[in-house]
Amino acid sequence: MFSRFKTSAPSSAIEYIIVGLGNPGREYENTRHNCGFIALDYMAEKLDCKVNKIKFKSTVGDCMINGHRCLLMKPSTFMNLSGQAVVQAMNFYKIKPENVIVIFDDISLDVGKMRIRRKGSDGGQKGMQNIIYLSGSENFPRIKIGIGKKPHPDYDLKKWVLSRFSDNDKKLIEPLLDNIVDAVSYMVDSNIDKAMSLYNS
């Protein structure tokens, strides 16, 4: 699956920014709301890309995907202020929203499901909301990872998204991570339709 990736040393300008959304800090590790971080860490491992530099209010790494130089980014602003980091990097590299792929959690999708969209509203996701607000654009391709609905309507939403996955949920999430990595490889090749047809569920 990963033969499509070319991970030679970067030699050109940054073309794409790949952003995983989440909250920094050990207390938030592996929570439902940190699906974006989980996916980005997995991608970095597959690409042999070290995401360990501090820049743009984020932890970042620089890698090649299918001949495209990409910045992998994990904002350290906390979820609700993700736009501060993303827009700062966009402005620095002069990257348009269409070349910023955002990966985040979605409570409207069941665990084990993912959905790719070319653009759209924030869908109630606070990190995406802040990115759209500060950039003034909804034209961000995104990969949404299902974390499941609240156990019952009265359950506190914050408590739910900051909860950790059960062992059974983890088994459903793991196959998605490979799909997300492969989907990004299509997306940076301007083939988002192919990614959607293969991986939307």
Image (tube, rainbow, N blue to C red):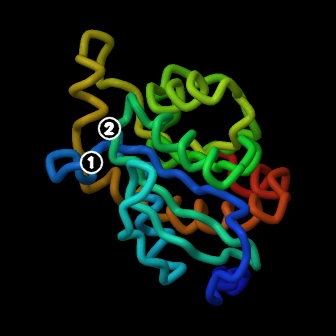
Q: Position of residue 187 (x, y in %)?
A: 75, 58
Crowd around label 2: few <14 · some 14–19 · many ≥20 (10 Å)? some
x then y, percent, for residue 55: 42, 58
10 Å neighbourhood of mark 1: few (<14), some, or many (≥20)? some
The location of residue 1, given as percent across then percent down, is: 66, 80
Q: Which amino acid does the dot numbered 1 rest on?
A: Pro
Q: The residue tagged with tag 1: helix, strand or loop?
A: loop
Residue 65 is marked as: none
The residue shown at (57%, 63%) is 71
Residue nearest the observer in this picture, 173 or 2: 2
- Give the answer, above or below, for where 109 lies relative to 152: below
Residue 13, percent from left and from top: 71, 69
Q: Is residue 173 left or right of residue 152?
A: right
Q: Which residue is mark 2?
A: 78
Depicted 182 relative to depicted 107: above or below: below
Viewer-nearest residue: 56 or 115: 56
The answer to whether mark 1 and mark 2 are in CB contact below 8 A is: yes
Q: Quadrant of the C terminus?
A: top right
Give the CA distance from mark 1 to mark 2: 6 Å
Task: Check disc 1 and report the residue beneath it.
Answer: 24
Q: Is residue 164 above or below residue 130?
A: below
For this orientation, the residue located farthest to the front is: 92
- Taking the image as shown, residue 108 lies to the left or right of residue 141, namely left
Residue drawn 50% across the image and 34% down it: 83
